Amino acid sequence: MSAPVVSVRNLRKSFRDVDALADVSFDVHEHGIHGLLGRNGAGKTTLLQILTGQQWADDGEVSVFGGDPFENAAVLRDVCFVKESQRYPDDFRVSQVLDAAAAILPRWDDDLARNLMADFDLPRRRKVKKLSRGMTSALGVVVGLASRAPLTLFDEPYLGLDAVSRQLFYDRLLADYAEHPRTVVLSTHLIDEVADLVDRVVVIDGGRVVVDDDAEQLRGRAVTVSGNADSVADFTTDHAVLAHESMGSMARTTVDGPLSPEVIAAARAAGLHVDPVSLQQFVVASTTRRKVSS
């Protein structure tokens, strides 16, 4: 396997007495659409800022294209980072943003940018500060996609888009990626929306990596077992419990798998219901792990 595009080892970053990142390690390999998932405040943005040289780590090692990204023009020229509430010079018009992107991003595709501008109905001559939140988000999407950067990082810039426009972004991303493969990282908490796009998933919670696996392996890996509380408790004794709810004599427990067909059949023979867990449910369970009883 080739060297990873991004390699992070034992990364730590604190702000005063708060650990934004604590002993974070993972790799991102060439090509593929990768999901960096987690709740707001989990540490995703801090991590991306370090990967793009906008923050420095307190400890640990970070490598992007084999080099340290901090003040490294040779590395950063192949990186495009688009974030929520992206800031632009106050007097820039939309057309000037695109001209600036074309000047600094060596793989910029102007034809793609024009097509995306039409898709999102963006006015080229309007000043950026006069754009609605949705239009500002769409402009960030245009820059990120048209950059065709070998490493493209999206830090939830599409949150200002309505559901239809977000789906348009996902469709255009998949279509262009199919023709021009590169490494894309989607940082988001809208897990259901990107579940079918991503090839690999890294989940951050409280500044720590709690999941790092292929998306296909995670889909259906966990199951929810429900039924009589005593039967559920007996069945789940030997399994890693992600979440548990109980109400009177009934209980529902989410366990980490995968479970073999024989084990699932035995659970159902005991009168229990066994249901697969979606990627979003799995991530939620992995980042809460609390018991709820009533």
Image (cartoon, grey):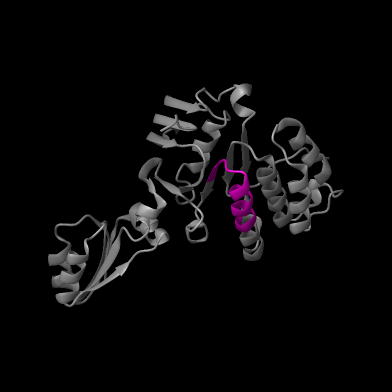
Q: Is residue 272 above or below residue 124?
A: below
Give how far across and how far down residue 287 sits, in percent: 36, 52
Quadrant containing the N terminus is: top left
Give how far across and how far down residue 267 sits, in percent: 18, 70
Do we see residue 209 in this rendering? yes
Give the camera-side residue of 107 and 286: 107
- Main secondary structure type of the part rendered in magenta: helix
Please state if 237 lies on the left or on the right of 173 as rendered: left
| Residues drawn in magenta | 170-185
Give the camera-side residue of 110 and 169: 110
Q: Is residue 162 above or below residue 4?
A: below
* Res 122 quadrant in image: bottom right
Residue at horizontal 60 percent and vertical 48 percent from the top: 177
* Res 49 quadrant in image: top right
Give how far across and how far down residue 110 sits, in percent: 77, 43
Please state if 125 lies on the left or on the right of 244 as rendered: right
Quadrant containing the C terminus is: bottom left
Residue at horizontal 48 percent and vertical 48 percent from the top: 35
Give the camera-side residue of 173 and 225: 173
Residue at horizontal 57 percent and vertical 40 percent from the top: 182
Give how far across and how far down residue 47 sits, in percent: 49, 36
Assess whether residue 14 is covered by the magenta stretch.
Answer: no
Q: Is residue 190 above or below residue 57?
A: below
Please state if 215 lies on the left or on the right of 240 as rendered: right
Outermost residue, front direction? 179
Assess whether residue 183 is covered by the magenta stretch.
Answer: yes
Residue at horizontal 44 percent and vertical 31 percent from the top: 2
Q: Is residue 16 above or below residue 203?
A: above
Q: How many marks?
A: 0
Do we see residue 120 in this rendering? no
